[in-house]
Every structure is written in structure tokens, then in C-alpha cells.
Image (cartoon, helix red, strand yellow):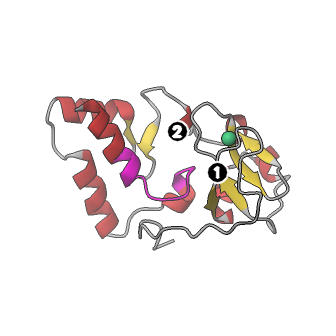
Amino acid sequence: MSDCCAMEEQVSESSGSEFCPTCIAKGKKIKIITLKSMLKPAALDTLNAELTHYFCSSKDCHVVYFDTDTKTYLTSDIKVAVHQKDQSLVVPVCYCFDWTKEKIKQYVERGLTPNPVEHIRENIKENRCGCEVNNPQGSCCLGNVTKFMNQLL
Ligand SMILES: [Zn+2]
């Protein structure tokens, strides 16, 4: 869990089934611990932990996870709102330290401290982040936070 913000590029294997069965976009390979943490009990009950799972980040696709057997898990199967698929301002961008779109917007527009990115970076440095189990995408939020902040400017 300590390396979840290490920014390592995931090497995608060409298994032929790394594409979302619904929107055909390429999924991002995800660790099983993220599904175990994110799935509601009823969905977790059907998980095949032997298979490789992928995350679909398409904005308009209701599929959050799918496996190499093309089984899908939808936004309604996940315990939290998924940042990429929910435009609501109360949805977190940073799940570990609770930076919602609303809060980031407020801090940026009013020039409040701490700056969201600096605050998150500081916590990463202290090894407090747990993106694998907190963030549905299973990886560091910093890219999303930076992107969202740039949209505000
Ligand atoms: Zn999809």
C-alpha cells in the first residue's frame, strides 16, 4: 500500500480484453484490493478474484470495473461516487484527504491555504495516502487534482 502514489506507469498487457465491454475504451489495469475495498457487499459476493480487473474512466459509461471475462461492475455497485463519472461538486477528486471539487474550487478561487496540490503532496510525503483502497481508480489522485485546478484557471 505504500507505493500507491509512486506514479509508476502501468505496463498494459495485450490480453485482448482490456477494453470496456460497454464503451470499448481501453481500461486501466487495477489491483484486486481496490475492488475488494470499493464494491458493495452484494457485488463483492460475485467477484472472481482470480481474474484481471480493469477500471473504465469514460465519463459517460456506467461501467466502473470489468474483468477478463467481461463481467462488469457499475457505478451503482460501488460504495463511493466515481470522480470521472459524476459531475457533482460534492464528489471527491482526492479521496484520501477529502478534496471535493467544491472545496478545491473554493480554495483556488479565494486563494486560501493550503493549496490543494501542496496539501496532498505533503501528505504523500508523510506516507499517509491510501489510494489503492480509497480512490476508485486505485491510483494517485494528483493528476486529477491538477487537471481540475487547471480547468478553473
Ligand atoms: Zn466503459
Residue 102, percent across and down? 35, 29
Residue 97 in sight here:
no
Displayed quadrant of residue 47: bottom right
Question: Between 71 and 110, which is closer to the camera in this rendering?
Answer: 71
Residue pointed to by mark 2: 84
Disc 2 versus disc 1: distance between alpha carbons?
15 Å
Q: Quadrant of the C terminus?
A: top left
Residue found farthest to the bottom: 2
Decide: is 10 above or below 65: below
Q: Which residues are magenta?
A: 134-145
Q: Residue at x 66, y 34 (%)?
A: 61
Residue pointed to by mark 1: 26
Residue 89, percent across and down? 42, 27
Q: Secondary structure at mark 1?
A: loop
Q: Amino acid at mark 1?
A: Lys
Residue 90 in sight here:
yes
Q: Is residue 142 magenta?
A: yes
Q: Amino acid at mark 2?
A: Gln
Decide: is 51 above or below 137: below
